[in-house]
Amino acid sequence: MTGTVEGSATYPSADREVEHELLRRALAGERLTRVLDVGCGRGEMSPTVLERAREYIGIDTDRSRIERAQQAFQGSGKNRAFLIANSNHLPFTSGSFSAVILIRVYHRVADPSGALREVLRVLEPGGRVILMVRPKPSPFTLLRDLWTRVSTSGAIHPLSFARAERLEVRPAREIGFVETLGGTRRRLGESGFDSVTELGHGFEDLPVFRRLPSRFWVRMASLLPKKLISPSVLIVATRKGLP
């Protein structure tokens, strides 16, 4: 597990409702065989995945989360399993999954390019990766800039408008780095993916907006311009090669 900071976190149920609906859209189409959930936490996404797939496998670096997931879904059937593993060393054979998802995890992976190469390896040709990213500039990074200024009484760290595509964020409780959407697209292309689709969302994370119904945010996710507005974006990319 050395060198990884990945792992999912617990978020308000309204946030999860939006993510579940967007994940349904990302998994839509022909019924999938096996889906891998990297940084699965307590397995919250597994019911939605199993609406679209025959088998779900969740992995996480946190033993306590895996144990809680196993307890929560004990006796639910043999098509759901939870294992301790990390994204840079996936314990699966090549081409063994139809899709791999990384929800609220990608920005916490210590080696994102290495993780994407591993994801590519375990995907079948034409398989898809679904990952949530926190792009910059965005309201999220703007708010983080402001919070840094207020909480430290120091200079604002210009995450939103710095020229670098990728920036480490240290210290951090829930985020390890931010990068531009263009940087993420290039990283996906260099790792062997194409056919990128983006579903913008994330405003439901902001406390001032949490009273609005989740169906509103699901609708807005397809309408709002993604590059400059969405605090987070769900990206769908396919492994190069015919299925």
Image (cartoon, rainbow, N blue to C red):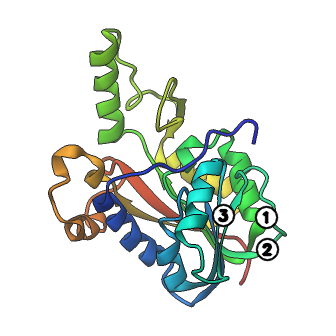
**Secondary structure at numbered mark 3:** strand
65 and 1: which is toward the camera: 65
Question: Label 2's element?
Answer: loop
Residue picked out by circle 1: 121
Pick whichever of labels 1 and 2 is earlier in the sequence: 2
Name which residue type carries label 3.
Answer: Phe
Identify the residue at image location x=50%, y=23%: 171
Q: Is residue 76 visible?
A: yes
Residue designated by label 3: 193
Q: Quadrant of residue 192?
A: bottom right
Give the image location of residue 19, x and y in percent: 39, 65
Amino acid type at mark 2: Gly
Query: Which residue of the protein is positioned furthest toward the top in this rendering?
Result: 154
Are dots 1 and 2 in contact, CB under 8 Å?
yes
Residue type at mark 1: give it: Arg
Residue 83 drawn at (x, y percent): 70, 61
Instruction: Give me the disc on residue 210.
Output: none
Residue 159 sits above or below residue 92 on the image: above
Tag 2 residue: 95
- Which is nearer the N-term, disc 3 or disc 1? 1
Label 3 neighbour load within 10 Å: few <14, some 14-19, many 20+? many
**Residue at x 53% of width, y 59% of height:** 42
Q: Give the percent coordinates (x, y) of residue 51.
A: 49, 84
Q: Residue at x 49, y 68 (%)?
A: 45
Question: Relative to the observer, which residue lies in front, 174 or 72?
Answer: 72
